[in-house]
Amino acid sequence: MPVLADRLTVALERLIQRGAPYQLLVIAGLIVLVALGGGLLAWGLTDAFAHPGAAVWWAFLRLTDPGYLGDDEGTTLRVISTVVTVLGYVLFMGSLIAILTQGLSRTMRRLESGLTPIAVRDHILILGWTNRTGPIVRELMLSEGRVRRFLSRRGARRLRIVILAERVDAGLYQELRDQLGPARPPRQVVFRSGSSMRIEHLRRVAFEQAAAILLPGADFALGGAEATDTRVVKTLMSIARHGHYRAGRVPVVVAEIFDTQKIPIARRAYDGPLELIAGDAFISRLIAQNARHPGLSHVYAELLSYEHGNEIYVRTHPELAGRPFGVLRYAFPEAVLLGVVRPEGSGFRPLLNPPPTFTPEPEDRFVLIARRYEAAVPAATALAAAAGPAPTAPARRMTMAVQPQRRVLMLGWSHKVRVLIQEFASYPGESFEIDVLSVVPAAERAAAMRRLDVPGERVRVRHLEGDYTVRADLERAGPAGYDNVILLGSDWLDSGEEADARTILGYVLLRALLPEDARDPAVLVELIDPANARLFRRRPGEVIISPVVLSHMLAHAALRQELTSVFGELFGPGGAEIFFRAVGDYGLAGRPATFRDVQQHAEAAGEIALGVRLHREADGPGGGVYLNPSGTQTWTFRPEDRIVVLTRYAEAASPAPDRPRP
């Protein structure tokens, strides 16, 4: 008998587990049994019914509607009616409501989790929720003009953003709202749940109909940077293998790769339009250049973030083909002309800061710094005024004064350290002594560094063990004896919030150890969470927010592919480089000068003036940097003021006199 009961129980459980229709079927069976039992009992114990069918119907009415309870007469009939009515409350009403509520909750959870395939096209698809995703969405929503021009080339009108995340719930929506701000609710954003490595999940987000597909990196992903690169390559292969695209409708794919050695592999995985961003290498270049030229973070913050002042634009002006660059540089009254990008094979070749005699070709695209897209246009009057004798090469080319030897203290450890040291090693005229202080065992860090091909005579690396958030360990390192102190976001922690908390604590301890008015060493802080940047306003030191920079690159490389090559040239080793030129090099110290005067002096030295940096405002918002000011803007420069110029490292670099040690 117990075995039979167990079998019946298991059968009932399996039936109930099959869903709401079967649950309703079980409840209906119970209602029929109660109606039969109550009706037959009332027919047998009373003479109120002519036949059993009438008694069963009587019981069913009491079971489903308690209002009939007062119509019964006789004690026996009333007792049976009361029992049947109570069972009706439990079975008919309670169970029915519970089943319907449970089914509705399951349906709402399914809809909320984003398992339903979408039916849109020409959308921007972001594969993965990382610390880059929110800033990417913010960049896209702020870049209305660039997005509109991108979509118009696809014949679309409205921006739609689809995000494929491993887990989708109300908390994820709220996190995106917090990052976008209350003024910009994500009405155009759709979440779907799934993995980019599964083709059925990619079809869920209509990857074949997307206008652009973005694969952002993840600093704190399971498995680290290597696992992230593996997922990117696998996803690219899935998109290429399973995609059936209409002619001319292949989506642009922009992916972030941590290991630059995997870039050729990723290119072979996808044969469509593909832009690869080497995230670690790019951030390392910014950090290294900022260490060599303190103050550049303010230039990066403006050029690599849509919210601040100027931006880099690429425009086609075939009517300007054949005119010398020396004439064209003054043809844009509201923009600074940097050069051109030239189509070459499946990509583009940047030609920035070319000689004055360089003449653009009809297919070249002009690269400019401007406050808005509409300002990056030539003025007919300016072209006419610039017409005259053909320009000649500059009479003199000035050297770039660089510090030949530099001591750098890195606080923290991440996968970027190896790439950062390689970046320091790429400057042949300079040598670096780099000390790395971290709680990660020195043997583990040294093992990770052994694979690097770093010239030991120019770059010496020493690993120090200690916690830079402990005053004694940081004091033992002697930060005052270095030229630069770099606080890196540590990716061995569980989240960006924890990494930033350690970085901020380390910064506070560092400032406590240094004299209050000390400007040496130059302090550079890498943050993961953009919200923490406001903590450093009006505090000594500079900040680079790596997810914001990389998100800007990923978003705008998808909207304008030429920008990838421009960013690589501007912020990469060698070639064109942004540099601070002392006003005394141009003979402008102590006398009034307009920005047009500054531009002419820069042109005579073979450089392009991008703006100025006023030393008296260096500790204020923007670091005293003014890019692309009006040509009539006038300053009386002090000797410590600087000109922001675009020059060429290979031609201009030369050692500077050693600074006295602090």
Image (cartoon, rainbow, N blue to C red):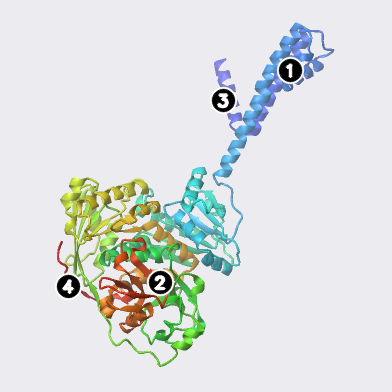
Decide if residue 87 is in sight here.
yes
Return the residue at label 2: 566
Mark 2, other Cα within 10 Å: few <14 / some 14–19 / many ≥20: many
| Residue 427 location (% of width, % of height) | 25, 70
> For residue 10, which numbered disc appears in the image?
3
Q: Residue at x 18, y 46 (%)?
A: 472
Q: Check if mark 4's residue and mark 1's residue have beta carbons within 8 Å.
A: no
Q: CA distance from mark 3 to mark 2?
A: 67 Å
Mark 4 or mark 2: name the one nearer the start of the chain: 2
Mark 1, other Cα within 10 Å: few <14 / some 14–19 / many ≥20: many
Q: CA distance from mark 4 to mark 2?
A: 32 Å
Indicate the secondary structure of the residue bearing disc 1.
helix
In the image, 57: left or right of 297? right
Return the residue at label 4: 657
Indicate the secondary structure of the residue bearing disc 2.
helix
Residue type for callout 2 = Val
Mark 4, other Cα within 10 Å: few <14 / some 14–19 / many ≥20: few
